[in-house]
Image (cartoon, rainbow, N blue to C red):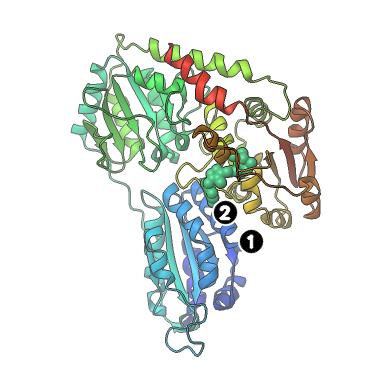
Amino acid sequence: MTKASDLFVSCLEQEGVEYVFGVPGEENLDFLDSLSRSKKIKLILTRHEQGAGFMAATYGRHTGKAGVCVATLGPGATNLVTAAAYAQLGGMPMMMLTGQKPIKSSKQGRFQILDVVAMMGPLTKYTRQLASADNIPSRIREAFRLAQEEKPGAVHLEFPEDIAHEQTDGIPIPKSNARRPVADEKSIHAAARRIEKASSPLLVIGAGANRTMTSGMLSQFIENTGIPFVTTQLGKGVVDELSPKFLGCAALSSGDFVHRAIGAADLIINVGHDVIEKPPFFMRAGGAEVIHINFRSAEVDPVYFPQYEVIGDIGNSIWQIKETIQPQAAWDFASMMKARAAELAHTARSAHDMRFPIYPQHLVAQVRKAVPDDGIICLDNGVYKIWFGRNYPARAPNTVLLDNALATMGAGLPSAMASSMIYPDRKVMAICGDGGFMMNSQEMETAVRLKLNITVLILNDNSYGMIRWKQANMGFADWGLTYGNPDFVKYAESYGANGHRVTSAAELPGVLETCLNSPGVNLIEVPVDYSDNDPILNKEIRDLSAAL
Ligand SMILES: Cc1ncc(C[n+]2csc(CCOP(=O)(O)OP(=O)(O)O)c2C)c(N)n1
Ligand SMILES: [Mg+2]
């Protein structure tokens, strides 16, 4: 016989779990004790459950294996809610474990008790209470299977205190090696023939294409056929964006050069489209036709009704189409290429803007120069996400981690921390607004304690800049969105991190270089001026691309 919490940990080991991130409570103490004896799994204690959840989700995003986080009942579980939504909407496999009072007999009334299983319902693919120790192996296997299967997402198990110290003769259930189904030949041929017939085909790469096997297949497809590509924000980096075939990332909703390029296509090969992202294009009657290539069939929408669908493993579908397609001399990409050339010329003009506080265009250019191609930047959520999405060429998958699904603030620092744990030999940078950073800044202590090597760049505009910009766009008065900040240099130092403040545009490259090459946690505060948002993002880009 085995103690239930020991069996739980053995099942996690069987799933290949390396870390459990979290903030345990009294109701998790049996689990914690069992975990202390594991030789394979490390506990990563955080300072807030949200930080643990964001780290676990990011672990899932990088590895494809569910990241695990633990919290207590009630308040611990409610603190995990945003991270659950982040993983669920963003397609990141994550398993949440929460404790609960004894379910068979409890003498504490309803103190701290919430129906956590029900609360997690809309936020997960699977949420269950472990009501018997005998069910632990099957529930855990099922939770991991669902978290990791397309579309990956969040799952939740509640492990009540009395069940945790039951005895059971259960044993872990081994993982099966199920393969994903592949698309059938007829749909492959229909797609290939349609692409051959097109005048100006274009590839759009979205969130679902960001999978290990897909990246190589898509790169080969583009190389062999010469068909250009654009990406959504979550498709960034799936294919090298310094490729001459890259036409841009749809970071703005409309009116950008990239939309001009999309408008020049008569056929869109839409790979890994996920409706959770703002659509990079809207279908209309008589407009460009669409081939939907995905793990699942297209969700019905008034602006999305693809004429062709290739359903099955995306990497395999792309490979199969590549094998049968005949690239056509008649394909015409001239208008698309013109839009891209105009965009590159426009971006280059402002890359060396030396005004201070820093302008975002200059900042993006300098960060790109400082970060190696395999370096990872993890963006929090604010105005700069648009500038990085548009202007930062990602060269490899998962080198730009951003959240264009839940688009939550507060994930920048935890996702950089998890990235650095998984890839200790790569340069990792969190890029946060002053608002987003402060939402989980307490994890600086965790980062220092774990001896992580990360750089945390904070863009200081003393405000919720993104909302202030939208407020101005909508013609409202500038009101209610500014605040004060701590002295970020002293703040960093109080955690045992290194603090730097950039005081001129010329200083930025040197400070970036120093921080990226120094061990430990390095924080850089950069004052930022967002006054170009309106003239450039709202006007200049629209006018220039409309005039093409
Ligand atoms: C958790 C959360 N709360 C609120 C928002 C709405 N929101 C989006 S961007 C933003 C402001 C971000 O401010 P900051 O982090 O300072 O970045 P900035 O835009 O100023 O560069 C807010 C409040 C959100 N996305 N997530
Ligand atoms: Mg700000």
Q: Looking at the rendering, in which quadrant would you find the C terminus?
A: top left
Residue 312, percent across and down? 28, 41
Identify the residue at image location x=40%, y=15%: 336
Tell me the number on the disc at residue 55: 2
**What is the quadrant of residue 194 in the picture?**
top left
Tell me the number on the disc at residue 46: 1
- Residue 424 makes an appearance in the image: no
- Residue 223 makes an appearance in the image: yes
Name which residue type carries label 1: Thr
Labels 1 and 2 touching (C-beta < 8 A): yes
The answer to whether residue 52 is above or below residue 166 is above
Q: In terms of sequence position, does the residue under pointer 1 or pointer 2 come before the other?
A: 1
The answer to whether residue 6 is above or below residue 355 is below
The answer to whether residue 237 is above or below residue 223 is below
**What is the quadrant of residue 261 in the picture?**
top left
Identify the residue at image location x=39%, y=40%: 208
Identify the residue at image location x=38%, y=25%: 221
Crowding around mark 2 (Cα neighbors within 10 Å: few <14, some 14 to 19, many 20+) is many
The answer to whether residue 499 is above or below residue 169 is above
The residue closer to the viewer here, 38 or 421, is: 421
Q: Quick one: which residue is furthest to the left in this view?
A: 186
**Number of numbered labels in the structure image:** 2
Residue 486, percent across and down? 75, 49
**What is the quadrant of residue 430 in the picture?**
top right
Tell me the SS state at disc 2: helix
Tell me the SS state at disc 1: loop
Residue 187, percent across and down? 21, 33
Q: Quadrant of ligand 1?
A: top right
Crowding around mark 1 (Cα neighbors within 10 Å: few <14, some 14 to 19, many 20+) is many
Name which residue type carries label 2: Met
Tell me the number on the disc at residue 542: none
Residue 135, percent across and down? 38, 75
